[in-house]
Image (cartoon, rainbow, N blue to C red):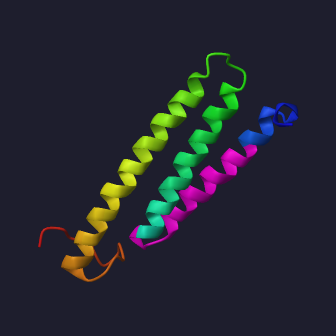
């Protein structure tokens, strides 16, 4: 069933995911929501890699997707730990209020 879907459909969905992720990162001020926007951007890249790996017999795109998923999981864990520490120090996760990390 998926072999009948043209690659352009995957690319359109990926572009929409990427645009949504960029819009979230630019407009939102909550650190957790910004992280979710970054995850949307990474998932858009994953969708592109999988879509283009359909034409490759060696499945290299899917191997790259595995690495991107691992890096995204590590990024989310480290970023959430940083957000918890920032919250403990500043008592907020609003990025506008946490504008000076010198304190």
Q: Is residue 4 left or right of residue 24?
A: right
Query: Where residue 51 sits in the image (x, y, percent)?
Result: 69, 33
Query: Where residue 102 sits in the image (x, y, percent)?
Result: 13, 68
Query: Where residue 34 sits in the image (x, y, percent)?
Result: 45, 64
Q: Residue furthest top?
A: 57
Rendered position, 27 above or below 64: below
Q: Residue furthest bottom?
A: 91
Residue found 80% across the figure and 41% down from its top: 9
Q: Is residue 2 left or right of residue 14?
A: right
Q: Is residue 15 magenta?
A: yes
Q: Is residue 49 left or right of residue 79?
A: right
Q: Is residue 55 left or right of residue 95?
A: right
Residue found 56% across the figure and 54% down from its top: 40
- Magenta stretch, overall SS: helix
Looking at the rendering, which quadrant does residue 3 occupy?
Answer: top right
Q: Which residues are magenta?
A: 12-31
Q: Can see residue 100?
A: yes
Residue found 40% across the figure and 43% down from its top: 71
Looking at the rendering, which quadrant does residue 32 occupy?
Answer: bottom left
Nearer to me, 55 or 66: 66
Residue found 19% across the figure and 77% down from its top: 89
Rendered position, 45 above or below 28: above
Q: Quadrant of the C terminus?
A: bottom left
Query: Where residue 56 sits in the image (x, y, percent)?
Result: 67, 18
Give the mark count.
0
């Amino acid at each position: 069933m998926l072999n009948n879907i043209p690659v352009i459909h995957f690319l359109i969905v990926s572009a929409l995911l990427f645009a949504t992720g960029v819009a979230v990162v630019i407009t939102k001020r909550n650190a957790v929501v910004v992280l979710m926007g970054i995850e949307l951007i990474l998932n858009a890249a994953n969708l592109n890699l999988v879509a283009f790996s359909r034409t490759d017999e060696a499945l290299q795109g899917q191997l790259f997707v595995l690495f991107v998923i691992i890096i995204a999981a590590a990024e989310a864990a480290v970023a959430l730990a940083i957000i918890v520490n920032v919250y403990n120090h500043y008592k907020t996760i609003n990025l506008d209020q946490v504008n000076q990390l010198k304190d």
